[in-house]
Image (cartoon, rainbow, N blue to C red):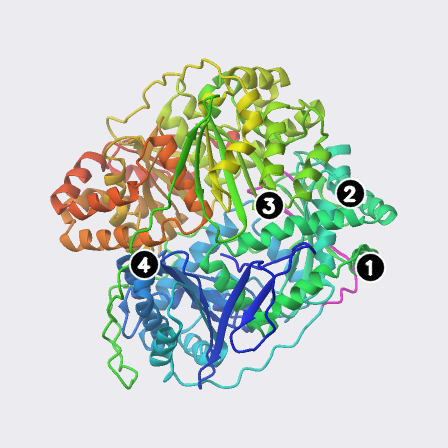
Amino acid sequence: MKTIKLLIFSSCVFFTILCCQQNEDKNDSTEFKVDYEKFTLDNGLQVILHVDKSDPVVAVALTAHVGSAREKEGRTGFAHLFEHLLFLESENLGKGGLDQMSARIGGSGANGSTSRDRTNYFQTVPKDALEKMIWAEADKLGYFINTVTEPVLAKEKQVVKNEKRQRVDNQPYGHNSSVINGNLYPKGHPYSWEVIGSLEDLQNATLKDVKEFYQRWYVPNNVTLTIAGDIDVEQTKTWVKKYFDEIPRGEEIPKIKAQPVNLKETKRLYYEDNFARAPRLTMAWPGVPQYHEDSYALDVLTSYLSNGKKAPLNKVLIDDQELTGNVAFYQNNSEIAGQIMLSVTAFNQTDLNTVASAINDGFKSFEANGISEADLNRIKARQETRFYNGLSSVLGKGFQLAQYEIFAGDPGFINQDVKNILAVTPEDVMRVYNTYIKDENYVVTSFVPMGEKNLVLDNSQLANVVEEKIIEGAEETFDASITAMYEKTPSSFDRSVEPDYGESPELNIPEVWKRELDSGIKVYGIENNEVPLVQFEMQIEGGLLFEDKNKVGVSNLLANLMTKGTKNKTPEELENAIESLGAQINAYASDNAIVISGNTLSKHFNATLNLVTEILLEPRWDEKEFDLLKQNTISSIQRSKANPNSIASNEFAKILYGDKNIFAYSNNGTEDSVNAITITDLQNYYNTYLAPNLTNMHVVGAIGEDKVIEALSTINNQWESKEIAIPELPLPLYPETSTVYFYDVPGAKQSVIRFGYPALKATHKDYYPASVMNYRLGGGGFASQLTQELREGKGYTYGIRSGFTGSEHKGEFVISSGVRTNVTYESAALVKEILENYGKNYTQEDLEVTKGYTIKSNARAFETLGAKLDMLANISNYGYEDDYAKQRTAMVNELTVDDVKELIEKYIKPNQMVYLIVGDAETQLSKLEGLGFGEVVLLNDETNN
């Protein structure tokens, strides 16, 4: 998760946040505003309220001003561990705490995130559950610590260690960040260790550490509560005071001082990465803290140097020398220091000395030419749209208000932020380059595939990376069923009584308009004026569906090439035209379609659609861009061969669909198929399969039906219909008996599992009922049995889920997770047992929890523009009625336990499934015969990796 930062907007627009505590001059502008009210309780709790009545939902965020920077050496990862603990139980919420309540009230799911400097807990809920949320958040803050016991701590250590294995240890380049930070910052600096910490430190955390951390940092005077949405301000204040007022104030929290870094020398380090298949060069310079006066010009600098065809680094590294398909250059600014990061994942077998030399050439180009006013304005226009996107949900607004309050001291800091942004000049951009980049010391890492040390940067030293060893029975055991015994914290009223619901919100279905144009394009729209944005997507049926299995990858390359210039615009000219509008236009291919999507300010919708028209009707067919795309795609395919999650997805599809079904293949293709594709293949696909009569256009945002139709007039008039037959696909390979398959990744720190079988298409009458049935199995997060058993009960995994996914052409039921390597068999056996008993054990309580979540969550179903686009896609692609959400609510209300058991009997078949494991065969494969499905099929051997 990440905190949203509202960034930059153009000088022609004026933005304000008005504080209700202040009497400010009224501005005649009708531009977008975010009003808020801030007050402070006697115990120091900062409270920020924002009213937004556009949807019957409320976002509640509790942010503690504590992250990994407040940890002690030897106890790294503690702030993040604590984030996990706070979800588990509190005195009055009981075991399962907020997670269980979230399911009952139809919330988005209790979630949290930890950074170097803060930890936040957040959720969006229907407005009738607001008092419940305030009660629950107060219980977490003031009535939590007594519930943490040794077994609770032992189990959550395992969960967090699994998260680290999944996100770091089992990923290509996963250790790069720790090498950078451990060398950029001096020993003892709060940013010299990773937020997630080390496995050793996590294991050494004690119950005493937990209590000390809580008592020091989780106190009202170090916390900000943000509530944004459809609220009554006075009633909300009353509830906040009732539930938070008597939580005692903690010790005073000293302001942490800035600790800038001054590197005395450049450091060069390398590492041979078991999971990497391409060399990566990363450079890091000391930067500045967030909101530092130079951070604004550095934002522009990093964007200009790396983003787009005109970027100096892209010109050299991508276009001229063809060393990579992407350059990433950005700031990572935190509270007390910052860093400037440049990362290049080069093509296979590329010497990183060549990459470093090319980076230097790009810098020299910038030194000679600088940045123009036009390019500066282009960047600001793009960031204006980003600003509005950050405010498109009530949670986004709440996040930003808290961000400014904690790190700038004022939710209204946006006004100064705007001034700082708009004040950036070309001279400022060159000045910060000379100050922080040119001739300055830096840390540079070379992460290369195992056995390819010859590719590392000259004079590099071996980095210190601690790899976890796979040891059977290494983890401590615990009993998660033990109930904590403690004396309750005194309160002036009975906090064990959960508040009642407020008035139930009505299910507001957005009004949909529809038009079928003469060309055959079907247009679907929802007008919504909450923010001055429009999002759209043009879905052209086809994608992988129309491909030849001997040349898979044509639709993917075609979609990517479509935005690389037009007949009358070079790739750079098209890119500049899009960015000058502050717009985004993307094209991509899926299994079922080629999609052109976009995001723009409503005032620029016509101009943006004009560019879409050029992209669609006047392709450039640029040979050089085609060659670059092929090379980049092949590099991506090579890298995916070392990513256990990518391996699992690809192998699972092959097993499910077989050689004769095109859905057995990734639409990226294979190295051989992509190498065989010519630009003529793309042109043939374009001329044969792209047609208006296969096109659905979805448009949502601040624009009316007539304006949309007008903007589509050229496409409608000039794009010719075609007679195209949708291919009949062979049936997928439904297994008669279960088989276990294993793909060997030697040294894997986790085993990735994909269990499942071909299932219902999205158009099947049972598709949605089956999805509802799955909620308590694995679709309900912490309300699901799979999560409760494998994560909460055993500590085997960071996360596990099951679900039905489908389109009009195919459907699958899939269980997916990453489990600790040394419990691979135990995890698979437990999943099998849960599946076997799901129908037998399904109860009325399970049904009531499912109904509560499914029905109440509809209040937030269409809050964002993205959610409204999804609604239009469901209507156009699957033939759903406009009010399908209400129809589904009625169906769920009528469900009985017997209905659900019948669905389980039909669609949950543990003895007719594919069981695929991607992991370390040497230590795990043989044990899996214990599942009772015969000999395990090894899909590869070490020589094929």
Q: Does residue 588 sit above or below 849 in this rendering?
A: above
- The tag on residue 792 is 4
Mark 2 or mark 4, which is nearer to you? 2
Q: Which residue is mark 1?
A: 431
Q: Estimate the x, y position of residue 538 in percent, counting from the top left.
A: 50, 32
Q: Disc 2 to disc 4, how far (Cα)?
A: 50 Å
Secondary structure at badge 2 equals helix
Position of 863 relative to 92 (above/below): above
Sequence order check, earlier mark of 1 and 3: 1
Amino acid type assigned to the residue bearing label 1 in the image: Arg
Alpha carbon of mark 3 to alpha carbon of mark 4: how far?
Answer: 50 Å
The reply, left or right, for residue 131 in relation to residue 523 is left
Q: Mark 1 or mark 3, which is nearer to you?
A: 3
Q: Give the residue at mark 2.
A: 312
Name the residue tied to disc 3: 603
Instruction: Tell me which segment is drawn in magenta.
Output: 261-279
Outermost residue, left direction? 898
Where on the picture, by quarter, is residue 409?
Answer: bottom right
Per the image, label 4 sits on a secondary structure element best described as: helix
